[in-house]
């Protein structure tokens, strides 16, 4: 489908309306999902529209959807259980397996029964593991409660004999056992009071007394906030009970291990279970979409959106089922879903646009315009040729080894390009693991070896890099302003483009020539001065053109002219290109210097190598993150702030949203 769409940033959309016979709805929905190019709108508002006939209704598939949701949750639990106890090697990325449509259907028909049995076995084993672990934890808690009473020889179920009573309980560790003993014996001289054990919080006490003295003993204990304890559910002595519980825990552990083994053995069936999961998801999605359609006894209706260049294949499908359909241009007030389609280089940088917001209907897609700037900025900020090679090669390997999709693919491909940019700028600035080769040659071999920069070394000429960074920033801002001017002209407001953008171009370029043109020739200073005056006067006169009254226009003009301070701060923001570029080199040099402190020889070589490896990993991680974040910031704040609104809604076609398989569209005419 994508190959048939025209090469544009924001794909042009068409409104689709369909009315068809209910008898063909189910096979049509299968084919529409297979096509995957139509977004179906919810018909929520239409049902309450009085213009529609009373006998039109929305099909309710809630029972089917709920049942399928429960099945999906159950199969998902089985997959989670198997993954947890699968000892096999896990892939770095989850990649969908490609299958022909017919092959998938045949495979599911052949394996579904056995797979459902395996799902039942996995879910049951998973539950038994959880139950066993809960029971073991409960028993361990019981044992912990019995441990302080371990020296007690009385059977726990014994509460009294024919003539005596047994009282067990605890008092706070702050209480004095001697005082308690004295009080009890005063009330019941024949009582036997024993401190079984004590810890930092409580004292554990056993009292045996005559039955007729029980009330007196309890009265004496109240003074000490005595907390009676009953062990009615336990049998035998404390030691016997603990031993029995330990046996039960061991038996539980054996059951848990057997169930873990069952789940481990089911790993060979995990692929089939994953296929079943995706099959259920597709069935659920088809059942859900029926609820977004309107129906009568005989026909159904829906409308939605599709890319303009997908019209031929959609039309072919509708003609096949002999449905009524209509394609329309979107109306001015309608919210249109946004789908981006860029070239090979700029497509990965859609990740940057998507992280901010998709373009609104009034915007243009900024991806193609931000892509080269992001490419340049990232490389300048990291600016080490060796780091660039590492990043580019690592991303290239990931792209070749895994069939990545979606945002993951875009991010990895973007970092591949950023690695190339980092190599380019690193070579220009002479950064190869900082100055590692220079330090290693001097430390280990006492040889002077320097890799000279192709252009210049920013650490020795930082002002040169600062000026270059500010020039790049100015170009970046001018491009953003130019886009705003283009959008104003496109929307029929050429004077806005002239007054709000053109005059600023004249003023800003004039100021640059006035300040720096002397290095070219005196004439440039004069030209710059004239341009600055013309631009400033023009902004002053036109900045308040939409205000009422002379005072309002003057105030508006002055306010617009004051905006020059924001342009100055915007340009200065690009000094971060210098700051982060220097940070990478400085950190690398510090690491290399620390590694060289052990001197030469074998010991020195080992220390230098260890410092180099760990330092390189740290430096790439921290400064690549900084380059990513600050490159995004320059796009979002400085660049987008000049022209971009955002807020677009992503195009969400009715398609197979599978997790483990990708059914090839080449097989769309089969089955």
Image (cartoon, rainbow, N blue to C red):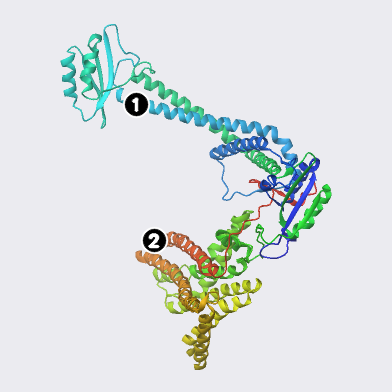
Q: Which mark is residue 607?
A: 2
- The correct choice, above or below, for 648 with respect to 452 in the image is above
Instruction: Name the residue at 39% across, 61% down.
Output: 607
Secondary structure under the numbered disc 1 in the rendered image: helix
Residue receiving disc 1: 145
Residue situated in front as seen by the camera: 397 or 161: 161
Instruction: Name the residue at 77% across, 50% down.
Output: 18
Name the spot of residue 515 as percent of width and height, x first: 46, 86
Residue situated in front as seen by the camera: 176 or 559: 559
Left or right: where 484 falls relative to 31: left
- The correct choice, above or below, for 353 with respect to 571 in the image is above
Farthest residue, direction front: 549
Q: Nearer the viewer, mark 1 or mark 2?
A: 1
Residue situated in front as seen by the camera: 401 or 103: 103
Instruction: Name the residue at 63% across, 46% down.
Output: 659
Name the spot of residue 415 as percent of width and height, x first: 56, 62
């Amino acid at each position: 489908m994508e190959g048939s769409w025209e090469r544009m940033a924001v794909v042009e959309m068409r409104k689709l309306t369909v009315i068809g016979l209910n008898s063909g709805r189910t096979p049509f929905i299968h084919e529409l999902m297979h096509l995957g190019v139509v977004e179906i709108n919810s018909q929520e508002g239409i049902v309450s529209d009085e213009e529609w006939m009373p006998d039109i209704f929305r099909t309710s598939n809630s029972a089917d959807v709920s049942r399928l949701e429960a099945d999906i949750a159950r199969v998902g639990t089985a997959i989670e259980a198997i993954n947890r106890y699968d000892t096999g090697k896990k892939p770095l990325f989850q990649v969908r397996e490609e299958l022909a449509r017919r092959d998938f259907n045949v495979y599911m028909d052949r394996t579904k029964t056995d797979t459902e049995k395996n799902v039942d076995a996995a879910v049951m084993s998973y539950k038994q593991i959880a139950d066993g672990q809960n029971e073991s934890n409960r028993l361990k808690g019981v044992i912990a409660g019995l441990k302080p009473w371990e020296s007690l020889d009385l059977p726990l179920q014994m509460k009294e004999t024919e003539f005596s009573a047994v009282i067990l309980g605890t008092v706070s560790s702050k209480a004095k056992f001697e005082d308690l003993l004295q009080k009890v014996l005063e009330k019941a001289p024949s009582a036997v009071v024993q401190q079984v054990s004590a810890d930092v919080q409580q004292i554990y006490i056993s009292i045996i007394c005559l039955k007729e003295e029980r009330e007196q003993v309890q009265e004496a204990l109240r003074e000490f906030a005595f907390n009676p304890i009953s062990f009615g559910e336990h049998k035998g002595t404390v030691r016997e009970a603990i031993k029995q519980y330990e046996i039960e825990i061991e038996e539980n552990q054996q059951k848990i291990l057997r169930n873990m083994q069952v789940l481990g053995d089911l790993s060979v069936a995990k692929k089939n279970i994953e296929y079943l999961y995706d099959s259920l998801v597709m069935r659920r999605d088809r059942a859900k979409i029926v609820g977004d359609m309107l129906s009568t006894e005989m026909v159904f209706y829906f409308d939605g959106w599709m890319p303009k260049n997908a019209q031929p294949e959609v039309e072919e499908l509708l003609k096949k089922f002999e449905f009524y359909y209509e394609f329309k241009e979107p109306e001015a007030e309608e919210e249109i879903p946004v789908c981006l389609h860029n070239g090979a280089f700029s497509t990965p940088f859609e990740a940057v646009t998507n992280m901010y917001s998709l373009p609104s209907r009034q915007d243009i897609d900024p991806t193609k315009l931000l892509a080269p700037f992001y490419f340049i900025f990232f490389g300048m900020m990291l600016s080490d040729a060796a780091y660039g090679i590492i990043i580019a090669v690592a991303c290239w390997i990931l792209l070749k080894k895994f069939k990545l999709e979606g945002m993951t693919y875009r991010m990895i491909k973007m970092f591949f390009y950023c690695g190339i940019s980092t190599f380019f700028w690193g070579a220009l600035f002479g950064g190869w693991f900082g100055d590692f080769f220079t330090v290693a040659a001097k430390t280990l071999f006492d040889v002077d070896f320097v890799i000279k920069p192709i252009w210049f070394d920013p650490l020795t000429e930082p002002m040169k890099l600062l000026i270059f960074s500010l020039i790049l920033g100015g170009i970046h801002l001018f491009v953003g302003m130019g886009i705003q001017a283009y959008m104003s002209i496109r929307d029929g407001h050429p004077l806005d483009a002239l007054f709000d953008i053109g005059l600023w171009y004249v003023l800003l370029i004039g100021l640059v020539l006035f300040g720096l043109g002397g290095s070219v020739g005196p004439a440039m200073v004069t030209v710059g001065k004239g341009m600055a005056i013309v631009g400033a006067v023009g902004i002053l006169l036109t900045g308040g053109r939409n205000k009422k009254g002379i005072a309002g226009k003057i105030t508006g003009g002055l306010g617009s002219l004051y905006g020059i301070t924001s342009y100055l701060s915007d340009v200065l923001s690009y000094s971060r290109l210098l700051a982060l570029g220097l940070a990478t080199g400085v950190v690398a040099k510090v690491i290399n210097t620390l590694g060289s402190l052990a001197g030469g020889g074998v010991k020195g070589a080992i220390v230098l190598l260890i410092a180099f490896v760990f330092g390189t990993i740290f430096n790439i991680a921290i400064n690549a993150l900084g380059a990513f974040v600050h490159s995004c910031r320059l796009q979002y704040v400085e660049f987008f702030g000049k022209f971009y609104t955002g807020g677009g809604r992503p195009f969400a076609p009715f398609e197979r949203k599978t997790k483990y398989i990708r059914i090839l569209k080449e097989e769309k005419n089969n089955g």
